[in-house]
Amino acid sequence: MSKRTFDPSRRNALKFGVLGMALAPMAGLVMVRNAAASDLPHVSEADPLAVSLKYKNDGSTAPRVDKAGTPAAEQVCGNCQLSQGDGEWLGCSIFPGKAVNSNGWCTAWVKKA
Ligand code: SF4
């Protein structure tokens, strides 16, 4: 019969490893939020993700439709739940590491709470 022992240092390594894996994605979000959006490269309308989401720097040229009680003309990145920061260029959860125009729009638009 073998007697198994558990090394406390191994237990701590496992504990912090799991904690680190859980926090790593959040660290990315914090970094994006803290980065000044004006310093980020702007999302290109030709970017494949932007094309698939019909992103436009000028929302008035996008195929917007009324959504969740918000008229199409009032939907812009500046009042989207997924945008971060303020100013002309904003961070966006959909386009990490890039900036979207505050007057832009894409099909993922969600009214800011
Ligand atoms: S998700 Fe929101 S902030 Fe991001 S591009 Fe689309 S409308 Fe703009």
Image: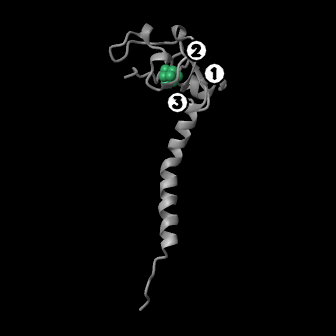
Residue type at mark 3?
Answer: Ile
Q: Position of residue 90 (x, y in %)?
A: 56, 22
Q: Badge 3: few (under 14), some or many (20 or more) residues near its Cα, within 10 Å? A: some
Q: Secondary structure at mark 2?
A: loop
Q: Position of residue 23 (x, y in %)?
A: 49, 48
Q: Are marks 2 and 1 in contact (CB under 8 Å)?
A: yes
Q: How is the image coloured?
A: one colour
Distance between mark 3 and mark 1 Cα atoms: 17 Å
Q: Badge 1: few (under 14), some or many (20 or more) residues near its Cα, within 10 Å? A: some
| Nearer to me, 29 or 34 | 34
Give the vertical position of 39 relative to 12 (above or below).
Answer: above
Task: State the residue lying farthest toward the bottom.
Answer: 1
Of label 2 and label 1, which has the lower sequence position? 1
Say which of marks 3 and 2 sits in front.
2
Q: Badge 2: few (under 14), some or many (20 or more) residues near its Cα, within 10 Å? A: some
| Disc 3 target residue | 94
| Disc 1 target residue | 38
Which of the 4 quarters of the picture holds residue 87? Answer: top right
**Label at residue 88:** 2
Q: Residue at x 57, y 36 (%)?
A: 31
Task: State the residue lying farthest toward the left.
Answer: 69
Q: Residue at x 41, y 92 (%)?
A: 1
Q: Residue at x 38, y 12 (%)?
A: 66
- The answer to whether 35 appears left or right of 80 in the picture is right
Distance between mark 2 and mark 1 Cα atoms: 8 Å
